[in-house]
Amino acid sequence: MAGHEMRAEANRNTQARIVADAERLVREMGYQKTMVADIAGILRTSPANVYRFFRSKRAIYEAVAARQMEEVETTAAAIASEDGEAVGRLRRLLAAIHLMNARRYTGDEKLHRMVATAMKNDWKVYDVHVERIICIIAKVVDDGTKQGVFEVSDVVPAAKFAMTAMSRFFDPLMIAQSANKPEPTLDQMIDFVMGAFKPRAGTPAKIPRAGEISGSRAAGRGGG
């Protein structure tokens, strides 16, 4: 291995150690109370050396959040790639995303709060996560359309609508806020989403584009 390759490997290992130690401290102390100096102390180095690998505290915790979100993405992608009818896969997929996020809230509340912060403050890592989940959902919807069990003309907008409909069960903040609200249940919400994709008599269900929605609203106002 050439010298620059060895240095690159060493840098990757150091970055991974920083992220792992940061995650451990977040679990113990919480996101707001954990300082870069605390991470440096575990690594037996200086904060300045930590900043060689991450430009800011937020960058470190974006990496921690990304690792948590990647676990959800990996599980979701595995379900989406299974063989068999898309109806069952989509149901398992939506339920799995909720259950993984809910378990994090109940089992790792401090870590979950950090992920919720990423969502609330529009961290780029969360935007990337949302796009990946939408793509995974879209794959299953597309499979279902090809199998004839779904009727959707445009799978990406359909996946976005499904993601929005499931917000109460996907969003860490909303999971916490809705914990004591009995309905809709997870199964009821999944049934609602699945029902929107079911075949209907006539032409396939058309998911309107944003421009079409705004256009119809404008027409409605003009005719009112």
Image (tube, rainbow, N blue to C red):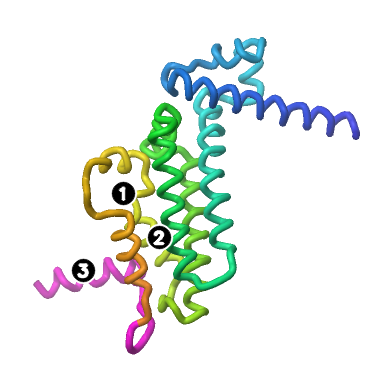
- Reading the chain from its start, which is encountered first: label 2 or label 3? 2
Q: In this view, does 126 lie above or below 52?
A: below
Percent from the top left, x then y, of residue 155? 45, 70
Give the Cα distance between marks 1 and 3: 30 Å
Give the Cα distance between marks 2 and 3: 23 Å
Say what amino acid the circle numbered 3 marks: Ala
- Reading the chain from its start, which is encountered first: label 1 or label 3? 1
Q: In this view, does 47 lie above or below 89?
A: above
Q: Nearer the viewer, mark 2 or mark 1?
A: 1
Task: Write the start and end of the magenta stretch as one range.
Answer: 200-224
Say what amino acid the circle numbered 2 marks: Lys
> Which residue position holds label 1?
168
Image quadrant in which the C terminus is located:
bottom left
Q: Which label belongs to residue 85?
A: none
Percent from the top left, x then y, of residue 191? 32, 65
- For label 2, the crowd category at 10 Å Cα-Cα, with few meaning under 14, some 14 to 19 and many 20 or more, is some
- For label 1, the crowd category at 10 Å Cα-Cα, with few meaning under 14, some 14 to 19 and many 20 or more, is many
Circles 2 and 3: CB atoms closer than 8 Å = no
Q: Nearer the viewer, mark 2 or mark 3?
A: 2
> Which residue position holds label 2?
160
